[in-house]
Amino acid sequence: MSKVFPDGTVAVDDLNLTVDNGEFLVLLGPSGCGKSTALRMIAGLEDPSAGEVLLDGEPVGNVHPADRQIAMIFQNYALYPHMTVGENIGFPLRLRKRAQNDIDAQVSQLATVLDITDTLGRKPAQLSGGQRQRVAMGRALARKPRIFLMDEPLSNLDSGLRAQLRAEISGLVRELKVTTVYVTHDQTEALTMADRIAVMRNGVLQDVGTPNEVYHHPATAYVAAFLGTPRMTLVQARVMAHLDKRVLLQIGEQSIDVPGHDVTAHMLRHYHGEDIIVGLRPEALRLPDPASQDPILHTRVKHLEHSGHESLAHLDVGATAAPIEMTEATPRPAPRTVKRGLFRRREIQAVASHPPPAAPGQERHLQRPIDLTLRLAPYPRLGPGDRISVQIDTRQLHFFGDRGERIGAGQQVRTAPRRA
Ligand SMILES: Nc1ncnc2c1ncn2[C@@H]1O[C@H](COP(=O)(O)OP(=O)(O)OP(=O)(O)O)[C@@H](O)[C@H]1O
Ligand SMILES: [Mg+2]
């Protein structure tokens, strides 16, 4: 489905996604990429401009939102302030004219599951943020939905509570086996909660897969940059393929050898003489091990970042960063007038994929330097300006072409749902 708003904004561009029964799917992407719009179309609060939503294989374009058996939880959960917690949770049941003892039994059962039994007699104003969020979940659950839609439900909470509710929510919806689409811009939330993650950028689906798949085989440079902390470093590199099957990657003034035997090196040979993007997560770097044949890069420590259990060293290797439009969500071009219902697919694609003109000082070819990040034991005896060598585990490198597409094994965009 696609959504073009009357002012020409393409919020969702040809999104094609199957969510399996009982699956917990996380829609992940930066602010403004179309997550809420996609969710609202599933709920029926927004009509698609093109395409349709199918529930259990049936188009629901003509089914009223209230009849879709969908429960939606928003970031700003609205509880009824004049009702107690118990009355809030029981409200959907009372609407359905259920018997009072039946309602009481269900409310008490839900309160036990959500661990808010003590608060049933209180008003929402007398609750903490986390408790309020759980009441909102309880009220949504009382409706016995077949689908849960959650739009950044934890973003108002502090980080400790967020981590706790993250675990509780994913445990609960799995126990209840309710199909869930969960929207967030927080990659940690996505990686820890999802059965599968769907990554969006500017309304376009970039990649779908299990957390393991999208983290280890991101389909695009953008997905690679979005997942993981610290972020993956994406550098420009020149490919030199040798006759003896070796592939040399030139990074700044230095070069590293990629062994010629695996599939990826084979594919890299096609890029001989061209610039590609190489992605390095901290996992790909280590202090040199004399027993290993892996290639070495010489670096200079720029600064250190200590976080108690580890220290991160930011290293200058003289590398140039990948072009910005490959790794960041680009601001949208000025809206074009597209008549509702009459737009053509090609027009939408053109709007969504054409990067805006670069602002002065942000030209594509501007050589932005970029650092590598090395994980070290806490408080190493190192300081800014020190020169150190790092060894590169070439099996942990990621390669991308000039449109950001993955080079090598696993470059296909995955769309088939997978059971948890
Ligand atoms: N009614 C509307 N009219 C015009 N444009 C809209 C409308 N609603 C949303 N948009 C635009 O559509 C795009 C997608 O919005 P959406 O709310 O789906 O983003 P999001 O991914 O949920 O972002 P966030 O993480 O900030 O909530 C944005 O550029 C937004 O400005
Ligand atoms: Mg939103």
Image (tube, rainbow, N blue to C red):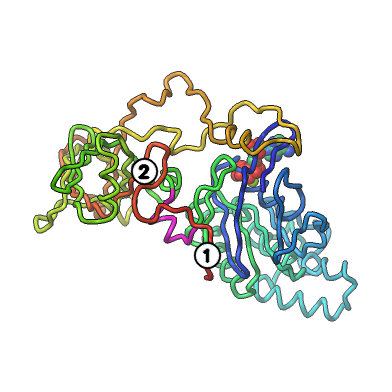
Please tell me whether mark 2 or mark 1 is closer to you in this view.
2
Residue 312 or 21: which is nearer the viewer?
21
Where does the image place residue 40, in percent across and percent down from the top left? Answer: 71, 50
SS at mark 1? Answer: loop
Q: Quadrant of residue 400?
A: top left
| Horizontal side of residue 189 vs 404, given as left or right | right
Residue 14 or 242: which is nearer the viewer?
242
- Range of magenta residues: 209-219
| Horizontal side of residue 128 vs 217, given as left or right | right
Which residue type does callout 1 highlight?
Asp
Where does the image place residue 368, in percent across and percent down from the top left? Answer: 34, 29
Between discs 2 and 1, the one toward the N terminus:
1
Q: Mark 2 points at which residue?
A: 400
Gap in angstroms between the C-alphas marked 2 and 1: 26 Å
Q: Quadrant of residue 367?
A: top left
Does the residue tagged 2 have its C-beta within 8 Å of any atom of ligand 1?
no
Image label count: 2
The mark found on residue 195 in the picture is 1
**Does residue 212 show up magenta in the picture?**
yes
Residue displayed at 83% across by 80% down: 102
Residue displayed at 87% across by 69% down: 94
Where does the image place residue 384, in percent across and percent down from the top left? Answer: 22, 37
- Residue placed furthest toward the left: 290
Residue displayed at 75% across by 47% down: 46
SS at mark 2? Answer: strand
